């Protein structure tokens, strides 16, 4: 009861104080009260902008597995980020799932990471060209220290490839971990009743595999005019599986088209080209240069080159040709366009796969004339050179990879003639016979 009496007395004094205030002061006090009330109901911006986040203190261990970390399962913690030079005390791991419209730039902004860090990552990514376009559903993990410095980034490209970037000596190094999986051969055969495409689909061949068959034999055989009802086709395909799951990565190893007059054959060699049973090439050989003439090389292949822009030691995995913007760029061999797009550091770029063994890349382009998934022939105009991305001037950056490892394109041993060389003829015949045996042809 005494409390109520004191409360009423205080309330009377407060009301009297308000009533005696000048009108300007009275309305200012009311506005201040309303503003404070509105602010108290606003949600926290930092909480609203976070995607998926969890705080984590990683255990202190010691890593000593060479220059890079070993490829370890996701459930390991420290090993998945690389070198032991990282201080894991007080670090936090952030897990992000990419949504439609997300970019690495806006994700970094939400986490308070600087544009300079993103710039460094993109330079390190020139070896892989994977940070330019994120895909919805893609998983990304960030490891950040107590001072909000990015120590590592790990992204799942697909279920076969994982790319990591680790801070080492104030710059980022990259490591692509690829599960090789298991390649299994599958045999398909069928009879022609009308359209080869329809009949091939009916026996289980994919559209890409049918296109590969047509491309391999197109200079020797006309599928539209020479095929007749009753002719048969026999195809051996190698497919990749990871943990028992088909990755949809495949390669046609051998093809036999049997007509009433003769048999047409195509066998895939180790050099990524198709030859007939006698070792005669079914397509054009490779060309050494992706441009006409003999352009000056402004920067050669160099694993220890000092980068002209960042002034850091970065591997130069390709050859730079000093050509002006608009110079025509050609593919050096038959292949399929694996990627064609834009990367902040590489600019407009193209990646072409020439069978399982060879891959070529073309960077800093001004124009692109091909699209992803397109199958192209040697000598096809694919682009024009330029000065896009981070570049010190107009030029063409050209790379040649063997089994996904960069090599010196000016020294690599290429099959430049149409016929299998005498040196490789014995190995080719052995490979051909193993294919025929699997197809029950010998």
Image (tube, rainbow, N blue to C red):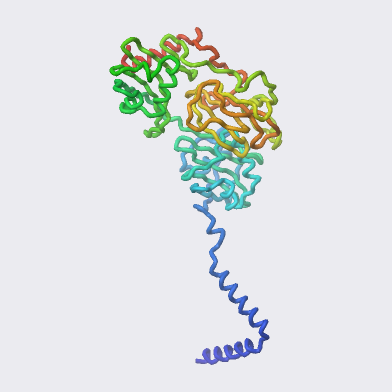
In the image, residue 19 above or below residue 266? below
Q: In which quarter of the image is residue 151?
A: top right
x 70%, y 34%: residue: 392
As rendered, which of 134 and 85 lies closer to the eye? Answer: 134
Residue closest to the eye, 117 or 441: 441
Could you tell whether 181 is left or right of 6 in the image? left
Q: Where is residue 214 in the image (x, y as percent from the top left)?
A: 41, 21
- Residue nearest the viewer, comparing 128 with 169: 128
Please say if 239 is above or below 283. below
- Outermost residue toward the top? 422
Task: Say which residue appears at 50% left-offset and 33% top-offset.
Answer: 372
- Observer able to see residue 210: yes
Answer left or right for 35 relative to 75.
Answer: right
Give coordinates of residue 164: x percent, y percent. 55, 39
Is residue 205 shown left or right of residue 362? Answer: left
Q: Could you tell me residue 165's position as x and y percent?
A: 57, 39
Total residue callouts: 0
Decide which of 168, 136 is in the foreground and name it.
136
Which residue does the image show at 41% across and 20% down from the upper left? 253
Q: Is residue 301 left or right of residue 157?
A: right
What is the x, y in percent for residue 15?
Answer: 60, 88
Q: Is residue 64 visible?
A: no
Quadrant where the image shows the C terminus? top left
């Amino acid at each position: 009861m005494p409390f109520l009496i004191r409360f009423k007395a205080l309330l009377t004094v407060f009301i009297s104080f308000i009533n005696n205030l000048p009108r300007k002061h009275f309305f200012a006090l009311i506005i201040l009260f309303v503003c404070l009330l509105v602010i108290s109901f606003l949600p926290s911006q930092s909480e609203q902008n976070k995607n998926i986040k969890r705080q984590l203190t990683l255990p202190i261990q010691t890593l000593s597995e060479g220059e890079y970390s070993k490829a370890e399962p996701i459930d390991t913690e420290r090993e998945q980020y690389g070198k032991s030079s990282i201080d894991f005390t007080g670090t936090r791991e952030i897990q992000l799932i990419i949504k439609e419209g997300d970019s690495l730039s806006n994700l970094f902004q939400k986490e308070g990471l600087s544009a300079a860090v993103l710039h460094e990552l993109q330079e390190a990514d020139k070896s892989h060209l994977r940070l330019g376009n994120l895909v919805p559903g893609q998983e990304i993990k960030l490891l950040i220290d107590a001072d909000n410095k990015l120590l590592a980034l790990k992204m799942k490209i697909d279920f076969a490839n994982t790319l990591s970037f680790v801070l080492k000596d104030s710059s980022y190094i990259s490591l692509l971990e690829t599960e090789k999986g298991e390649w299994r051969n599958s045999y398909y055969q069928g009879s022609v009743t009308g359209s080869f495409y329809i009949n091939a689909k009916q026996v289980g061949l994919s559209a890409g595999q049918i296109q590969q068959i047509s491309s391999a034999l197109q200079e020797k055989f006309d599928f539209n005019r020479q095929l007749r009802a009753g002719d048969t086709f026999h195809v051996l395909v190698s497919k990749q599986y990871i943990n028992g799951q088909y990755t949809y990565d495949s390669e046609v190893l051998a093809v036999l088209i049997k007509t009433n007059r003769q048999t047409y054959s195509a066998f895939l060699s180790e050099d990524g080209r198709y030859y007939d049973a006698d070792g005669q090439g079914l397509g054009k050989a490779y060309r050494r240069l992706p441009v006409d003439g003999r352009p000056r090389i402004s920067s050669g292949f160099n694993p220890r080159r000092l980068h002209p822009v960042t002034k850091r030691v970065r591997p130069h995995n390709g050859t730079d040709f000093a050509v002006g913007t608009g110079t025509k760029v050609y593919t050096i061999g038959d292949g399929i366009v694996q990627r064609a797009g834009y990367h902040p550091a590489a600019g407009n770029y193209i990646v072409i796969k020439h069978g399982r063994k060879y891959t070529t890349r073309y960077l800093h382009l001004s124009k692109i004339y091909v699209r992803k998934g397109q199958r192209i022939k040697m000598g096809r105009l694919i682009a024009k050179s330029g000065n896009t991305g981070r570049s010190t001037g107009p030029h063409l950056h050209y790379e040649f990879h063997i089994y996904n490892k960069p090599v010196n394109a000016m020294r690599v041993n290429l099959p430049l003639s149409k016929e299998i060389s005498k040196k490789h003829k014995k190995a080719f015949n052995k490979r051909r016979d193993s294919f025929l045996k699997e197809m029950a042809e010998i």
